[in-house]
Amino acid sequence: MTVLVDDPIWPAHGRLWAHLISDADLDELHAFAAAQGVPARAFDLDHYDVPADAVPRLLAAGAKRVGGKELTRRLIASGLRIRRRDRH
């Protein structure tokens, strides 16, 4: 499994946010996120929303930085992607 994080370019709530995903397994993604102090409420069906200040900590813990298009491509290829139209 590889945990991937994109660049924090998504503005919300006065901050910039990135996405944290797994390219293979949600259980391992949840374990990685919990070990790094990412709250469960940050999970959004197939990814975690993480603030910009968390990205260096995630990278130091072993996440790999990729661009947004690569992150999306890898999430789709993993079969874990939840399409926008399938979100409630």
Image: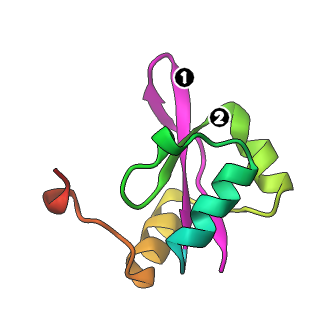
Q: Mark 1 falls on what kind of element?
A: strand
Nearer to the camera, 62 or 10: 62
Please give left or right for residue 61 compared with residue 6 in the image.
Answer: right
In the rendered view, tell whether residue 43 sits above or below residue 72: above
Residue at the location (53% across, 36% down)? 17
Instruction: Point out residue 27 in the picture as x, y percentages from the top left corner.
Output: 55, 70
Q: Give neighbour class at mark 2: few <14, some 14-19, many 20+ (Cα, 10 Å).
A: some
Residue type at mark 2: give it: Ala
Decide which of tag 1 and tag 2 comes sooner along the chain: 1
Q: CA distance from mark 1 to mark 2?
A: 7 Å
- The one nearer the camera, 50 or 33, is 33
In the picture, the disc for residue 15 is 1
State left or right for residue 69 relative to residue 64. Answer: left
State the extent of the magenta-drawn residues as a range.
1-22
The colour scheme is: rainbow
Q: Residue furthest right?
A: 60
Q: Can you tell which quarter of the image residue 18 is in? A: top right
What percent of the width, then of the height, locates residue 15?
54, 23
Q: Is residue 31 left or right of residue 19?
A: right
Identify the residue at image location x=55%, y=30%: 16
**Three-letter amino acid code at disc 1?**
Arg
Locate the N terminus by quadrant.
Answer: bottom right
| 1 and 2 marks in contact (CB < 8 Å) | yes
For image coordinates 51% across by 65% down, the residue present is: 71
